[in-house]
């Protein structure tokens, strides 16, 4: 699109450097179009371009990315179809139909994998919720015991470790809910799949887990090193405040002293005539 706009410029108004940059852009676009055309017209290259990454655990994001990649190639194919006047990018009907079918099948496969991923997430969420309920019971009992009795450092460390495990389960549920909500949005838009009950359950669970995440952070405030840090911070703040007051008092005393000196300098000198009479008497003598 940018190249098309630049091609319509009056070339007589361009300097030598602009002509070179335009030629460079033209070559880059030509190279890119050749690569796209070769990929589309070669089933092996196209399959390799659409291949899922093997080093990643497949998630909804993986399938969505692959789906949109196929859609991108579909738009490229349509673009080359409109360029039948250019012999370089000519597509016969048979090639166009085969590539179009390959891309459409691939998109349908990604939608199917996204549905399977959603079903897996639903089952996974149920298992995690059951695990969460069991962990919640232990957490509530331990929290009550923690608040009613004074624990030894070892017992306190065990309690804090239990909180971290409980919080981790809650975070896992939160991530699963986010992926379910994303899957529902994706499949509803591109596959007309209506999953209102699943979506509502995921949203409610997400809100609940956010509250849990906030609650599980509270007991960490009772850790000894945090309390020690708070005391040290308060002591340092009090010391700083005392030093600040001391400096203010010194500055105030200094200002008052300077003010007194200024007052003495500005006081008028009163002549009682003693000097004048003394001079007149000395002259008479």
Image (spheres, grey):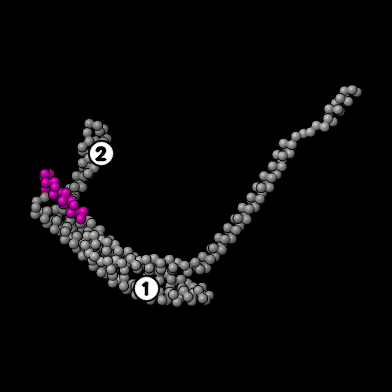
* Nearer to the camera, 237 or 158: 237
* Residue 80 part of the magenta-drawn span: yes
Whether 250 is drawn above or below 189: the answer is: above
Task: Count the labels in the image.
Answer: 2
In the current view of this chain or complex, which residue is farthest to the right?
Answer: 285
**Residue picked out by circle 2:** 21
Whole-percent x and y of residue 248? 64, 50
User: Which segment is the magenta one?
Assistant: 71-90
* Residue ID at (45%, 77%): 141
Instruction: Say which of marks 1 and 2 sits in front.
Output: 1
Q: Residue 88, percent across and down?
A: 13, 45
Q: Is residue 247 magenta?
A: no
Which is more toward the observer, 45 or 86?
86
- Left or right, 242 with respect to 134, comes to right
Q: To which quarter of the image does residue 108 belong?
A: bottom left
Label 1 crowding class (10 Å Cα cut-off): few <14, some 14-19, many 20+? some
Q: Are marks 1 and 2 in contact (CB under 8 Å)?
A: no
Give the quadrant of residue 47: bottom left
Percent position of residue 215, x then y: 44, 68
Q: Residues within 10 Å of mark 2 (few under 14, many from 20)?
A: few
Residue underneath mark 1 = 132
Q: At x 59% / y 60%, what residue is drawn?
A: 235
Foreground pick, 40 / 2: 2
Mark 1 or 2, nearer chain start: 2
Q: Residue 161's quadrant in the figure?
A: bottom left
Residue 35 point in image, percent of width and height: 19, 49
Q: Is residue 100 left or right of residue 229?
A: left
Quarter of the rendering occupied by the N terminus: top left
């Amino acid at each position: 699109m940018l190249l098309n706009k630049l091609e319509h410029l009056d070339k007589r108004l361009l300097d030598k450097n602009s002509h070179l940059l335009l030629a460079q852009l033209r070559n880059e676009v030509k190279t890119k179009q050749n690569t796209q055309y070769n990929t589309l017209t070669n089933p092996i290259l196209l399959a390799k371009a659409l291949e899922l990454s093997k080093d990643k655990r497949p998630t909804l994001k993986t399938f969505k990315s692959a789906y949109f990649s196929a859609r991108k190639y579909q738009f490229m194919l349509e673009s080359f179809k409109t360029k039948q006047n250019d012999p370089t990018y000519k597509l016969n009907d048979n090639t166009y139909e085969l590539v179009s079918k390959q891309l459409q099948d691939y998109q349908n496969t990604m939608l199917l994998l996204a549905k399977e991923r959603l079903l897996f997430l639903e089952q996974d969420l149920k298992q995690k919720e059951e695990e969460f309920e069991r962990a919640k019971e232990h957490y509530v009992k331990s929290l009550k015991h923690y608040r009613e009795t004074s624990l030894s450092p070892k017992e306190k460390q065990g309690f804090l470790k239990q909180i971290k495990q409980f919080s981790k389960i809650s975070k896992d549920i939160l991530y699963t809910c986010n992926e379910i909500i994303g899957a529902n949005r994706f499949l509803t838009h591109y596959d007309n799949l209506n999953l209102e009950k699943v979506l509502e359950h995921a949203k409610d669970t997400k809100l609940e887990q956010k509250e849990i995440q906030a609650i599980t952070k509270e007991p960490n405030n009772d850790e000894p090193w945090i309390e020690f840090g708070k005391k040290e911070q308060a002591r340092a703040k009090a010391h700083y405040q005392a030093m600040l007051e001391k400096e203010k008092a010194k500055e105030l005393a200094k200002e008052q002293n300077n003010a007194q000196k200024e007052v003495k300098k500005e006081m008028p000198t009163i002549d009682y005539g003693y000097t004048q009479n003394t001079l007149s008497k000395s002259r008479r003598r």
